[in-house]
Amino acid sequence: MDRKQTRLRIAAALVALPILGTALTGPAAPLAALSPLAPAPASAADECAVGVMARLPGPPVAFAEMGLPADGRRYTGAGITVAIVDSGVDASRPQLAKALVPGRSDSLISDGERSDGLGDSQGHGTALAGIIAARPSPTSGVVGIAPDARIISLRVFRDDSQQSIDKGLGPDAGRIAEAIRKATDRGARVITVALSDDVDTPALRDATNYATSRGALVVASAGNRDTTKQTEDSPRFPAAYPDALAVTAVGPTGLATSSSIHGPHIDVAAPGQNVLTTSNGGGDCRYAPDAPSSSFATAYAAGAAALVAQAYPKETPQQWAYRLEATADRPDPDARDDRIGWGTIRPAAALGLRPSSSTRGPVSPFADTSGAARASVSTRVTAHETRADDITFVAALVLGAGGLIAVFALAARTRRRPGTGRRDGGTAA
């Protein structure tokens, strides 16, 4: 029986069962990734408009999706400088003003905006800065994953419109490479590049190597399919360089999306949907309400890297990246895949990891893990891409859950055998 027939039979069975419990609050939307070069489209709600000082309740849902407490944490990124190589950061935002390191930001383009990199006509970089290091406020639900980290803004493009591209103000690999070097020289320990290119540029490769050799981790977007001319799965740069941490986006269920660029260059995944963060020229905004964006996922991973860097300041960028990879949540603790890499990051688990020869997952820079235990069960759970019809089907299952409880309980009593049971791969925070 194929998958479609199975779903139809289960759906038909649900019709005959009583529906117990509460109904869902609304229809689920299909998941799709957004371009790493452009900001996710703002919510249609008025609170995202420029000049509207909206205050939305928090904390960001991504914290729960990553198993990270919203407050009361020991590590908050204190003492760690994170560079944002992007469209700039709006320094007039109250929750970002105190996070910016005085005198170290810069603009590598001349378009009439501030020359110090602290203006942002597009809003992309401002959103990333809020995800990483927005200071908590009693009047706002926005708070960064590393709320005590310091920020450097390196402005490398105005926007990705054709007009800006024609004027030489669009994303450019040479400027990104220069910004990575500047960020390194100005003390950044984590460098956020929520941009991607399908061309391996020597200058960009050298800049990434330069950052790593001087103790900075480049955290970069693994790419998306919807706004690139090269839509086939292929390496994206700088994410695909060995020294960079390549990040893809997952939706609220933790599944990859068919719009993301997949491939062996992906290292980890992070949440990228329903992102509560700061907006340029306004207050709070909830970006990407219907589809995850790799830009936002990259920012969450960069913030997590800042937490790890604070906790383990004497470790190398490769060791910080390893902590995030080894503790990421994945179906098989011994294997990565080309959709989510080593899995969705779990910052608390990365902070608590005590690397040893028995740690399962990627090759370790701490110890020889070649003899680490392998999965002993024969059944593996495989994460599939989320599709709109699948979400509708899951909704039907939830609605019929009350009627199915007795059936499942009876099945469990009559079919349970010794040695079987539920297996959750990976390490959850």
Image: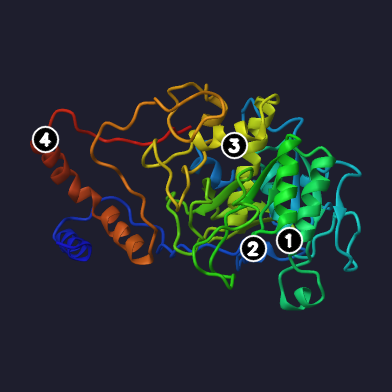
Question: Could you tell me which residue is drawn at 30 percent across and 35 percent down?
Answer: 423
Left or right: residue 69 compared with residue 122: left
Which mark is first along the chain, 4 or 3?
A: 3
Kind of residue indicated by mark 3: Ala
Quick check: can you spot residue 69? no
Q: CA distance from mark 3 to mark 4?
A: 44 Å
The picture quadrant where one finds residue 8 is bottom left
| 403 lies above or below 64 | below
Which mark is first along the chain, 3 or 2?
A: 2
Q: Tag 4: Cα neighbours inside 10 Å, few (<14), some, or many (≥20)?
A: few
Which residue is label 1 attached to? 173
Which mark is first along the chain, 2 or 4?
A: 2
Q: CA distance from mark 1 to mark 3?
A: 23 Å
Which residue is label 2 attached to? 199
Q: CA distance from mark 2 to mark 3?
A: 24 Å
Left or right: residue 73 compared with residue 357: right
Which residue is label 4 attached to? 413
Q: Position of residue 91 (x, y in %)?
A: 83, 51
The picture quadrant where one finds residue 370 is top left
Q: Are marks 1 and 2 in contact (CB under 8 Å)?
A: yes
Which residue is label 3 attached to? 321
Q: Position of residue 285 (x, y in %)?
A: 65, 57
Q: CA distance from mark 4 to mark 2?
A: 56 Å
